[in-house]
Image (spheres, helix red, strand yellow):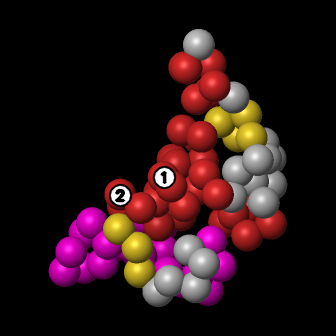
Amino acid sequence: MANEKFMKTMQPDAELGAVIGNEPVARPTAVKKIWDYIKKNNLQDKVNKRNINADEKLLKVFAGKKQVTMFELAGILGKHLK
């Protein structure tokens, strides 16, 4: 049952939708899409690969934080999926 909840499609809010698109997605798909965006735009910190540097779009998703760790990312995404 927990797996069903994990795979449930959820609607990204406007901030996250600007990064991954506005279509409803399952949480693992949202994580994959945001990582694709991070890699495409070279936003992983060059010194510490565990850190993600925000561009203009991610700054809104990250609530104004200029840098977050990859471990914070899942929690942040959860706040933007309904």
Asked if the residue under mark 2 is in contact with the one under mark 1, i.e. CB atoms within 8 Å, the reply is yes
Q: Residue at x 41, y 61 (%)?
A: 72
Answer whether residue 57 is visible to the viewer in this image. no
Q: Is residue 67 above or below residue 27?
A: below
54 part of magenta stretch:
yes
Location of mark 1 (residue): 74
Circle 2 is placed at which residue position? 71
What residue type is disc 2 on?
Phe
- Residue at position x 40%, y 73% in the image: 68
Residue type beneath disc 1: Ala
Place residue 42 in its image quadrant.
Answer: bottom left
Residue 76 versus residue 31 in the image, above or below: below
Element marked by disc 1: helix
Most extreme residue toward the top is 1
The dot on residue 17 is: none
Q: Which residues are magenta?
A: 39-61
Closer to the camera in the image, 47 or 61: 61
Q: CA distance from mark 1 to mark 2?
A: 7 Å
Residue 74, percent across and down?
A: 48, 52
